[in-house]
Image: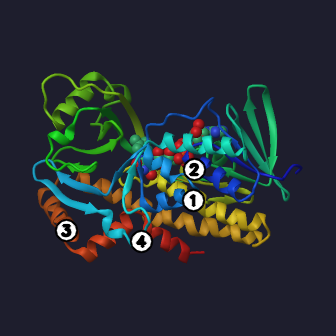
Amino acid sequence: MKGNDRVLIAGAGPVGCVAALHLSQNGIPVTLLEACAELPEDLRASTFHPPTLDMLDELGVVERLISEGIICPVWQYRDVQDGVIAEWDLGVLGNDTRHPYRVQCEQYKLTRIIVEELARAGSVDVRFQNRVVAAAQDDDGVSVEVEAPGGRETLHGRYLVAADGASSVIRIGQGIGFDGLTFPELWLCASTAYPFDDHFENLAPIAYVAGVDFWFVFVRVPGLWRLLMPSRPGESAEMLVTDESVQQRMQQICPKDGDYDTYHRTAYAVHQRVADTYRKGRIFLAGDSAHINNPLGGMGMNGGIHDAVNLCEKLDGVWHGRTDESELDRYDAQRRPIAIEYVQLATLRNKALLEETDADTRRTKHDELRRTAADPVAARNYLLQSSMIGVLARARELG
Ligand SMILES: Cc1cc2nc3c(=O)[nH]c(=O)nc-3n(C[C@H](O)[C@H](O)[C@H](O)COP(=O)(O)OP(=O)(O)OC[C@H]3O[C@@H](n4cnc5c(N)ncnc54)[C@H](O)[C@@H]3O)c2cc1C
């Protein structure tokens, strides 16, 4: 296969952008292919965990991200009736990370910052309206077929990073399975500028709130509160985003005179899936193309960025002749078990905790959380895991 002088990346989401920046900063030529005409303004991820901030710092983009977001050292688990059950202060991780806090910032701001940085450095061939429709490989390299404004085109490279999201055509085309489940309910995400912090005592910028027969999540982003709530049986996506549905839910959460002004509302299906392999020869899956999970805990994008950094460190070694090709197998060996053994289980546990309806079980679980939060050693361990620092250390032990 000719023209194998570069790495091709499909998808300019957070994962593809981080991979492009990392590789280009290490002197590796990159072509970044994005299906859309411009960077999608995705209202999805907003939580950046401490180790992700450390990685973005290494790449020189964290200061700007922080300046466009909100620093949140504290987050909470709350009960509708009882108020705060457990408050977690990331400040205790001061010796474990340079960023002992979460940053709340919309994921599209990261992709914009990175693409601007790539343009400034002139280091990456970024192509919008280039939708990858097929990929092939042989011993020498990879080729991708793209649909571009001028028609179909074939591009060549030495490796291909499939960061083309949950419906990855590359994963599907390579016949890589994506086992798991899709939840029967849909989730509604709606945002409003209403000052919930004036109405809930001591409300942290991220708060998971459990009620007896409903639950929701408060997430602060600059200028807005986002609310995340599940659908009820039988509600379709169309029903979920109607004024009636959104207003009724918000009034249930915080009754007030008059309707809420909302800035956006989206209904989406939620899945828990992991790809059968993250590597097939010269093709690597990273981010949502490799794993998806519910957003409770904020681990999808963060885990995807951790994939990108892990993979790019290995590609850097191989590209510059410091390590041989077998090093690339360690990407799958280190990252896939983390998705299965940690992220899937943690996000399912977070969901089960919010959904618990049995009064005794709820009380037991809440007492356990209170005890953990009150014990400095247990609280630090809890935060090391929930902020994903622990699993990065675990990944280094694998493979
Ligand atoms: C409501 C909600 C809240 C969330 N909150 C969080 C959170 O707080 N923290 C967190 O860590 N995660 C969160 N997530 C998950 C997070 O949004 C995803 O994990 C993250 O977007 C994955 O990034 P990615 O780059 O792998 O894929 P994507 O963001 O899906 O990006 C894929 C890119 O590839 C492009 N593309 C697709 N197909 C092709 C093709 N064939 N050719 C070329 N380009 C293509 C797309 O246009 C897109 O730009 C949340 C998700 C939801 C739905």
Q: Considering the numbered disc 3 on the image, is that residue within a helix, a strand or a loop?
A: helix
Q: Which residue is mark 4?
A: 96
- What's the CA distance linking mark 3 and mark 2? 35 Å
Q: Quadrant of residue 375?
A: bottom left
Q: Is mark 3 within 8 Å of ligand 1?
A: no
Some atom of ligand 1 lies within 8 Å of the CB belonging to the residue at label 4 = no
Kindly identify which numbered label has been placed on residue 287: none
Amino acid, disc 4: Asp
Q: Label 2 is placed on what type of residue? A: Val
Task: Tell me what residue is drawn at x 57 percent, y 50 percent.
Answer: 15
Tell me which residue sits at (77%, 51%) in the image. Answer: 29
Q: Nearer the viewer, mark 3 or mark 2?
A: 2
Write down the residue under mark 1. Answer: 307
Q: Which mark is residue 368?
A: 3
| 56 horizontally vs 213: left or right | right
State the CA–CA distance, disc 3 to disc 4: 25 Å
Residue 164: image x %, image y %? 61, 44
Q: Residue furthest right?
A: 2
Mark 3 vs 4, N-terminal side: 4
**At which x and y percent is residue 249?**
22, 33
Callout 2: SS: helix
Residue type at mark 1 is Asp
Say if mark 2 contacts mark 1, CB within 8 Å: yes
In the image, the residue with mark 2 has its CB under 8 Å from the nearest atom of ligand 1: yes
Q: Secondary structure at mark 4?
A: loop
Q: Picture quarter containing residue 224?
A: top left
